[in-house]
Amino acid sequence: MTTLLTVEIGRLIISTVQNLRGIVQLAISLTIGVVVGLLLIRLLTDLLKLNPFGRFYHTVRRPTDEFIHRMRTSQFYYPLKRSLGFDPSMIMILIALAITWYVVYVVISNLFQILQIFGVSLITFGEGRIFTGSRYLIGALLLAVIFFLMALMTIVFVNWIFGLLRRASYWAMERLAPLLRIFEFGGVFAGWSFIILWIALTFAAMAVQAIFLSG
């Protein structure tokens, strides 16, 4: 009875993850649609030269005001403006949205992968394959640690480019700082600790998948 229940729980986890993937894709599409719509409305208010002191003007522009402010205080704003010859804030918002959703999607996909492996490990435990189940479970736990660190690094990267997720970035850097100091080799590699750590984590994830999750 216990083995059958374990198998069913594992299958339930796997099927739930597959359903959630579709929900995430829908959320991404809806968010992009809403943001693009708000930016187009803001652009129309400029093209139509509406009264900037009117209530309608402020109401339709208010949802994007914070985004515009964030982009204009980014370190990339003025270099882009000089290069392109026009205000690039709306383009930067769309790029920031794409990168932010990519970060979210990668983090969620990694979480789904870990849950799926955990579900497979429960199924193998339920089928009496204790060694294989233990191997999958250890692999899932190791990937959880690696993907967590990579998620922290991605948050820091997004903050560095666009100034988004500032509070989360500070929290992430506090946890990454000890590891970054290990990979600060100096010499020609001075300042490369962030990239070296990312490469090391990527290699570690590949090694875990090859050793613990293959077959």
Image (cartoon, rainbow, N blue to C red):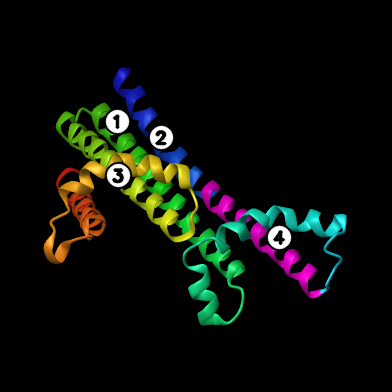
Marks 3 and 4, how far apart in space?
34 Å
Judge whether residue 214 can be spotted in this image. Answer: no
**Which is nearer the N-term, disc 3 or disc 1?**
1
How packed mark 1 is, by other alpha carbons closer than 10 Å (few <14, some 14-19, many 20 or more), is many
Instruction: Give coordinates of residue 145: x percent, y percent.
Output: 27, 39
Residue name at image x 25 percent, y 35 percent? 141
Q: Which residue position is annotated with label 1?
A: 122
Asked if the residue at tag 1 contacts the one at tag 2, i.e. Cβ–Cβ closer than 8 Å, the answer is yes
Magenta stretch containing residue 31, yes or no? yes
Asked if residue 180 is positioned above or below residue 13 in the image, the reply reads below
Kindly identify which residue carries mark 3.
149
- Kind of residue at badge 4: Leu
Where does the N terminus fall, quadrant-wise? Answer: top left
Residue at the image position 54 percent from the left and 81 percent from the top? 84
Give residue 38's mark.
Answer: 4
Which residue is nearer to you in this view: 26 or 99? 99
Q: Residue at x 20, y 57 (%)?
A: 196
Say which amino acid is labelled 3: Leu
Query: Separation of disc 3 and disc 2 at Cα?
Result: 24 Å
**Frontmost residue, 163 versus 212:** 163
Identified at 79% across, 68% down, the residue is 45
